[in-house]
Image (spheres, rainbow, N blue to C red):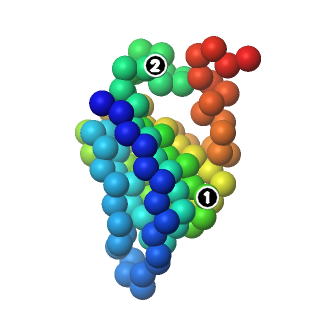
Amino acid sequence: MLGRLRAVVTSSSSRAPNFEVHTPNAIVGVRGTDFKTAYIEGKPCPGFPTCLRYTEVGVYKGVVEVSNPTNPKAPHVRVSAGYETTVPCELAPSSAAPLGMSELGAPGYR
């Protein structure tokens, strides 16, 4: 299973997300933003080589909130424009890092 999505969502006056993306191990709550998300399965997760399914989220404009529904006790992570997070397997989303940083930890990066 593999999928990628890039979306531009207009903001609303509601405090609740007006758009959500669900993958098998992540929920991305959106409140007016330009972001991308990808669910990868069957490849090692950068930084977690034994995890073979993960979700990547990158934000170009606005803010998204990312959580892992398979681990309800794990903290949510807010990701602002210019940053990204990775949700490995059943773990909590990683701390937000500048866009492109996850690629630096990818196997084979030189």
The percent position of residue 9, horizontal first and vertical second, equals: 45, 69
Local crowd at mark 2 within 10 Å, few (<14), some, or many (≥20)?
some
Q: Which mark is residue 44?
A: 2
Residue 109 in percent (x, y) is at: 67, 19
Residue identified by numbered label 1: 60
Residue at image x 37%, y 49%? 67
- The answer to which image quadrant residue 70 occupies is top left
Tell me how many marks there are: 2
In screen coordinates, is 21 left or right of 107? left
Residue 92 vs residue 19, the one in the foreground: 19
Inspect the image, locate mark 1, and give the three-letter code of the amino acid beneath it.
Tyr
Crowdedness of circle 1 by 10 Å Cα count: few (<14), some, many (20+)? some
Q: Relative to 45, is 10 above or below?
A: below
Q: Quadrant of residue 80?
A: bottom right
Between 93 and 25, the one lying in front of the other is: 25
Residue 71 visible to an observer of this rendering:
no
**First in sequence: mark 2 vs mark 1:** 2
Q: Are marks 2 and 1 in contact (CB under 8 Å)?
A: no
Q: Nearer the viewer, residue 43 or 93?
A: 43
Q: Give above or below for 19 relative to 102.
A: below
Query: Is 101 drawn above or below residue 19 in the view shown?
Result: above
Question: What amino acid type should be assigned to the residue bearing mark 2?
Answer: Pro
Q: Quadrant of the C terminus?
A: top right
Q: Secondary structure at mark 2?
A: loop
For the residues labelled 2 and 1, the Cα–Cα distance comes to 25 Å
Label 1 SS: strand
Q: Which residue is farthest right?
A: 110
The answer to whether residue 110 shows anywhere in this view is: yes
- Residue 12 image point, x, y percent: 42, 81
What residue is at 30 percent from the left and 30 percent from the top?
1
Q: In the figure, 106 relative to 16: above or below?
A: above
The residue drawn where x is 31% and y is 44% is 23
